[in-house]
Image (spheres, helix red, strand yellow):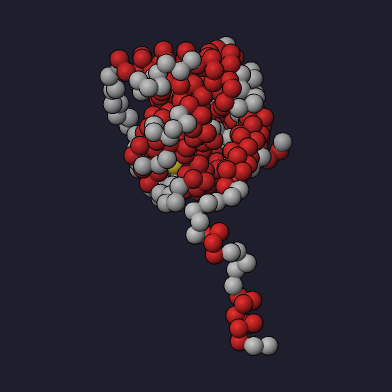
Amino acid sequence: MSYSDCLSDLLCGEDSSDIFSGESPGCSTDLESHDFEEESSIASFIEDERNFVPGFDYLSRFQSQSLDASAREESVAWILKVQAYCGFQPLTAYLSVNYLDRFLYSRRLPTDGWPWQLLSVACLSLAAKMEEPLVPSLLDLQVEGARYIFEPRTVRRMELLVLSVLDWRLRSITPFSFTGFFACKLDPTGDYIGFLISRAAEIILSNIKEASFLKYRPSSIAAAAILCAASDIPNLSLFNPEHAESWCDGLSKDKIIGCYRLMQDLVLDNSQRKPTKVLLPQLRVTIRARTRSSGSDSSSSSSSSSYKRRKLNNCLWAIDDKGSSE
């Protein structure tokens, strides 16, 4: 075999005239195929999203006060504080709340404040491990406004309980699964897509404390947030929200409109409020075993502290035992 024959085997089969002609046959077909595949993926997300949210009666439990709405609001507020303090992505905060809500739908917590705080820390830690490239230590994660400080092994035990209750399904479908696609649908030119996505993320997080949004699926929340973001852009503010249903198969016009109106009211209400900073005292919660006193003159404060630690530890183990028995 000659040298030229060996070299010819290494050359591409395309004609050089096709490469430099400036034409790209089949390009439009590829783009259309990509758009179809993307829309099919979004439609499958809409179909499956019900598997990653609490049950339909979850909101009614707060309305009937069988679940403490104020405790949930305080837990979500703490998660948002830590998300801002650590510079986490908006998705990390949303996933944390999603884990918390799904856990609360399946398990009841005592009405005391510390179990809610422990659950919040565990959910935030799990979400950060899923989404963040750098995750703070479990102690560093609790520095921002935490009322209780838990030892790492206590948090890890709670993480295992959360994972068990959620059946290890942490890769949830959230509004952030849809915002980019919906922004492209609303703004085909692409001039404002970056603003729409970032503004929608702000709107979603600013309303996540409100239990009223629990009756809406992630796709409806995403569509409503994009519509609210578009109202800040003169070129897009005239878009009729009723037409958002056409963005993808499976969307509900009534759900989108209902969520959009609720979101508009809350965005307006939030803009009129002035944020207030509340400083909370910190209590360190440990699970160290109680040590026997070496003298009869032990202080009453030390005895009381040991009792509190023992009581919190027993409660946590009771929760864990219940989870493993089911």
Q: Residue at x 34, y 39 (%)?
A: 85
Viewer-proximal residue among 303 and 156? 156
Tell me where residue 254 appears, x and y as whole percent: 58, 13
Q: Residue at x 48, y 15 (%)?
A: 240
Q: Is residue 314 left or right of residue 165?
A: left
Viewer-proximal residue among 10 and 75? 10
7 above or below 219? below
Q: Residue furthest bottom?
A: 2
Tell me where residue 48 appears, x and y as whole percent: 66, 32
56 above or below 76? above
On the question of residue 66 being in view, the answer is no
On the question of residue 9 being in view, the answer is yes
Viewer-proximal residue among 18 and 255? 18
Q: Residue at x 59, y 22 (%)?
A: 246
Q: Give residue 32's quadrant in the image.
A: top right
Q: Give residue 35's quadrant in the image.
A: top right
Viewer-proximal residue among 43 and 158? 43
Q: Is residue 248 left or right of residue 241?
A: right
In the picture, which quadrant includes the N terminus?
A: bottom right
Tell me where residue 31 appears, x and y as whole percent: 57, 43
Q: Residue at x 54, y 17 (%)?
A: 243
- Total label count? 0
In the picture, which quadrant includes the C terminus?
A: top right
Tell me where residue 82 appears, x and y as whole percent: 38, 37
